[in-house]
Amino acid sequence: NAGVTQTPKFRILKIGQSMTLQCAQDMNHNYMYWYRQDPGMGLKLIYYSVGAGITDKGEVPNGYNVSRSTTEDFPLRLELAAPSQTSVYFCASSSFNRGFNYGYTFGSGTRLTVV
Amino acid sequence: DQQVKQNSPSLSVQEGRISILNCDYTNSMFDYFLWYKKYPAEGPTFLISISSIKDKNEDGRFTVFLNKSAKHLSLHIVPSQPGDSAVYFCAARLDDMRFGAGTRLTVKP
């Protein structure tokens, strides 16, 4: 009963490097999301997906890319890492139906530091 | 544009007493409001929600109140327990979810 699994848990990147944050869910949820949380701030939506092959930008998409080739996986790609991308990244999924909201299931997060 | 605000970064209460966490919002189009709880090194977990057409929802020790005219919601925890110590996020849903910055609740034995 894994829920939402994020890897890695921690990563230090040098400026200009690239990496992919992995996210997988086993609940057959059609909606998946990537959020970032900066200190003292709420979670901000980076990208989301409403199903395989469909992705869209959230509030803070610059510097990131996503893909959704399967229902289960929703990787987040950072190209040319910058110190401003130092944050905790959370992946979430949901199967919400407008009219009855179950809330999101979150992964445990990836703490990324760009130096 | 912070549409969901939690103005108290921290709250400390005694075990057995009531904890009241507050949240204000600016967009009257939000249709659902939720509270999430987060322990260190874990992701947020869904706690309770309320539809915009209701003014109260209760689940065990947790009750959420919604005052639409004031654009304000609150989470009441009664009685508070040390295990409730966590960061609580308020969230509001339209097409996506908007989160407040969180309130750290400490329940002292």
Image: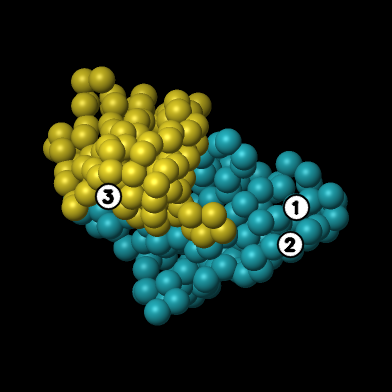
Chain colours: A cyan, B yellow
Dot 3 amino acid type:
Ile
Q: CA distance from mark 1 to mark 3?
A: 32 Å
Residue at mark 2: chain: A
The answer to whether residue B26 is left or right of residue B48 is right
Residue at mark 3: chain: B
The residue under label 3 is B48
Looking at the picture, how far across and down is residue A92, in whole percent? 46, 59
The answer to whether residue A33 is left or right of residue A17 is left
The residue under label 2 is A11
Picture mark count = 3
Decide: is A18 above or below A56.
below
Circle 3 crowding by C-alpha within 10 Å: few under 14, some 14–19, many from 20: many
Decide: is B62 above or below A3.
above
| Nearest the eye: B108 or A29 | B108
Decide: is A78 above or below A87.
below
Q: SS at mark 1?
A: strand
Quarter location, residue A37:
top right
Q: CA distance from mark 2 to mark 1?
A: 6 Å
Q: Kindly indicate whether the residue at mark 1 contacts the one at mark 2 (C-beta within 8 angstroms).
A: yes
Q: SS at mark 3?
A: strand
Which residue is the extreme one toward the bottom? A1
